[in-house]
Structure formats: C-alpha cells, structure tokens
Image (tube, rainbow, N blue to C red):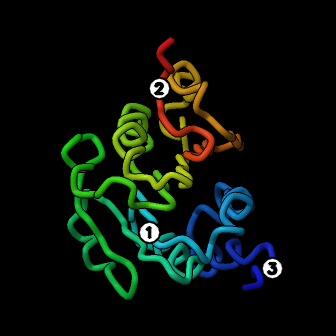
Amino acid sequence: MINPPAGELQMLGIHYKTDKAWRHFYMDIYESFLRDRRNDVKHVLELGVLGGASLRMWRDYFPNAIVTGLDNDPKCAQIEEKRIEIRLGDVSRLETFDQFPDDHFDVIVDDASHHPAHQITALCFLWPKLKRNGIYFIEDIGYTHRNWEQWFEVLQPQIFYTHKTLWSVLMVFDKKRIPRLGKEKP
C-alpha cells in the first residue's frame, strides 16, 4: 500500500481541532515516527481524553486500529464510537494500568495530567503493555510545572527523541531501541 502524502496527520488534527495540531505543533513529529507503520498499527492507547478530538484523529490515521482512551472523567464514556473505546482510570493510581494486557499496544500517547510524577509512573507501568516495536510518546512535559529537566535525571538513557517548543516538550521512546526501561545492571 502506498503511504499517503506527508501532512495528512496535520490535516486530520486540524479537522478534529486537536491542540496537537494548532497549539503544540506535534503533527510532523508524530508523522515522522508513525507514517511507515500506520497500516500495521492495531492498538493505540491515549491517556487523557478531553473531548475525544485526538482519539478520532488517531482512528482515522490508523485504518486498522482500535483506539483506546483512558481518562478519570466518567463523562468521557459518551465519546465511544466506531473503533474508539473508553476506559476509566486515574493515572496517579497504579491499579489503573492493570486493566491492559502486556505486549498489546503499538502506540501509546500520554496526554493526561501533565504532572511529571504521573508521566513517569505511567511510562514505567505501561512499558510492558507496549509491543516490542511500539512507540511511546509523552506530550507536554513540563507544561504545567515547567521543571521538565527532572525527566533527564530519571530517564536520560532511555529518551530516543526530544522536541521542545515554546509551550512544552514532547518525548519519544522507541521500544525496539530500548527494550527495557531503567539502568542496566553490570
């Protein structure tokens, strides 16, 4: 199958009015990592649902995927539609992540609380849920707390790509390149 022209994800982001497209300008970064694998992606998890705009964008971008949104607001359950499912949970509570099977997701996007402790916890507990060749994105690092440098102290050896804008930082973790999180034992 021929890949669509570059910029399609940006167009979908604008169409669905997700801030990923107009405020943070993440679309080119996402597309550079996801374009070649978009037809192979079967399961996407996004933490943080809000109005569901980005869930719809992911659904349309990945034609063969089920997109799961995780949020702590029960009203988000109303967003379920074709190939979009909603799970309820709080990213600050570890049991939230038990509802997902290991080695399941091709793509995980953390756009939830933007609190560094929650982002680090989610990354550590969701890493086993990511398939071997999966990609994990964390949006808006430091967006709320402006102390994103603490990430480098904790995760510097695992960070594959970092994109910093005026508003925030997007970090990308590639499981193929980083099979395990944490420091290796000698």
Marks 2, 3: nearer the viewer? 2
Residue at the disc numbered 2: 182
Q: Residue at x 53, y 22 (%)?
A: 150
Q: Earlier in the sequence, mark 2 or mark 3?
A: 3
| Snapshot quadrant of residue 140 | top right
Q: At label 3, which amino acid type do we have?
A: Pro
Q: CA distance from mark 2 to mark 3?
A: 37 Å
Q: In the rendered structure, find residue 43 and report the number of the disc placed on it.
A: 1
Q: Residues within 10 Å of mark 3 (few under 14, many from 20)?
A: few
Q: CA distance from mark 1 to mark 3?
A: 23 Å
Q: Position of residue 182 (x, y in %)?
A: 47, 26
Q: In the rendered structure, find residue 24 and report the number of the disc placed on it.
A: none
Q: Is residue 165 shown left or right of residue 159? A: right
Q: At label 1, which amino acid type do we have?
A: His
Q: Residue at x 30, y 46 (%)?
A: 91
Q: Position of residue 58 (x, y in %)?
A: 53, 73
Q: Is residue 152 shown left or right of residue 181? A: right
Residue at the disc numbered 3: 5
Helix, strand, or loop for circle 1? strand
Q: Is residue 158 above or below residue 25?
A: above
Q: Is residue 129 above or below residue 123?
A: below
